[in-house]
Image (cartoon, rainbow, N blue to C red):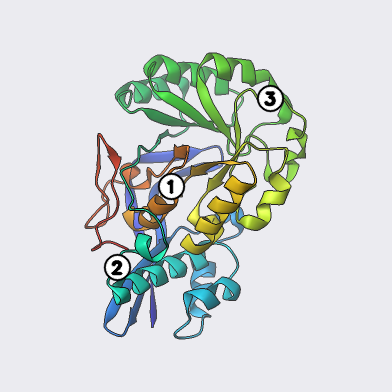
Amino acid sequence: MIEIHEESFPLARAFTISRGSRAAAQVLSVRICREGHEARGECVPYARYGESLASVRAQIEGLPEGITRHDLQAALPPGAARNAVDCALWDLEAKAAGVPVWKLAGLEAPKPLVTAYTLSLEAPEAMEARAREEAHRPLLKIKLGTPDDMARLEAVRRGAPESTIIVDANEGWSAEVYADLAPHLVRLGVALVEQPLPAGEDDALIGLERPVPVCADESCHDRASLAGMAGKYDMANIKLDKTGGLTEALALRDAARAAGFEIMVGCMVGSSLAMAPAHLVAQGARIVDLDGPLLLAEDRDPPMRHDAAGLHPADPALWG
């Protein structure tokens, strides 16, 4: 049977992007019990993609009893619902076989990964203060997408002069804005720009000089997205809530690399249960952005461990 649970994890501080703000991570988790084994998965429904807790719950409730991971790929489209169930089924297979998921998937043993830490959208002076607090982190991600982006970027660089910076415009720019900002992004040492243009308007990136690499997020969901990314993007941001789980995420990673894209692995704001399978996909990625648990006031037990070496693989008691 598949049990479905709606859960709320308060954030350590409000999280704001150009589309809005939140004070808690609203997640949906599933629990599958079969043949004496219990397995779990988690997803974060995203309104940008027409999802809600209710709609994702309905998708999962419509699945046949005893569905396999193979049959799941055709039973549900890419998205949050398939992600939660797919990851739980991987967890179930691992427990039944008595081996970790990485071995089942034919992967190498995972290692700790340095993850970005996100500074949400605030007034420039507030972002500078936050950057100063987090300046010990090697990689900071800044949420942008407003008319005041240069002031915010300059402020963060002042606050964290040594950190590598990546920026996420959350579809808030135009091609002209990117072109105008690009020299300043180079000057300030920005390593990449995530989804500067709306997904439906990104043809404007074709032929545009990109001195700072551009990464597809809202324009990259699964392998079917890759053809439409050609000539527009340099990197693909793989998120399991977009791919519909670990199965497609691993396939997308391999296909994106074969197509010449570099890899970023990101997340929605969720708990360690959601980060655990993404951590496997992120092995060898150029940019890792799995800071969801770091933004929470309280995580799951046991949480994924984070220290100076980075985000460590999940304890099998959590997942995998």
Image quadrant occupied by the N terminus: bottom left
Q: Residues within 10 Å of mark 1 (few under 14, many from 20)?
A: many
Q: Residues within 10 Å of mark 3 (few under 14, many from 20)?
A: few
Mark 2 crowd level (few <14, some 14–19, many ≥20, 10 Å Cα): some
Question: Residue placed at 51% from the left, 67% from the top?
Answer: 82
Q: Residue at x 50, y 63 (%)?
A: 247
Q: Position of residue 11 (x, y in %)?
A: 34, 45
From where the camera sits, is residue 270 visible?
A: no
**Circle 1 sits on which residue?**
282
Dot 1 and dot 3 residues touching (CB under 8 Å): no
Q: The disc labelled 2 sits on which kind of residue?
A: Val
Rendered position, 12 above or below 30: above
Type of residue at label 1?
Ala
* Proximity of marks 2 and 3: CB atoms separated by less than 8 Å: no
Mark 2 or 3: the one toward you: 2
Give the image location of residue 35, x and y in percent: 30, 85
Comparing labels 1 and 2, the label whose residue is closer to the camera: 2
For label 3, the residue is 177
Count every numbered label the image shows and give the total.
3
Q: Residue at x 56, y 71 (%)?
A: 73
- Which badge, 1 or 2, is on the more N-terminal residue? 2
Q: Is residue 192 visible?
A: yes
Amino acid type indicated by mark 3: Val
The label shown at residue 99 is 2
| 258 to the left or right of 60 | right
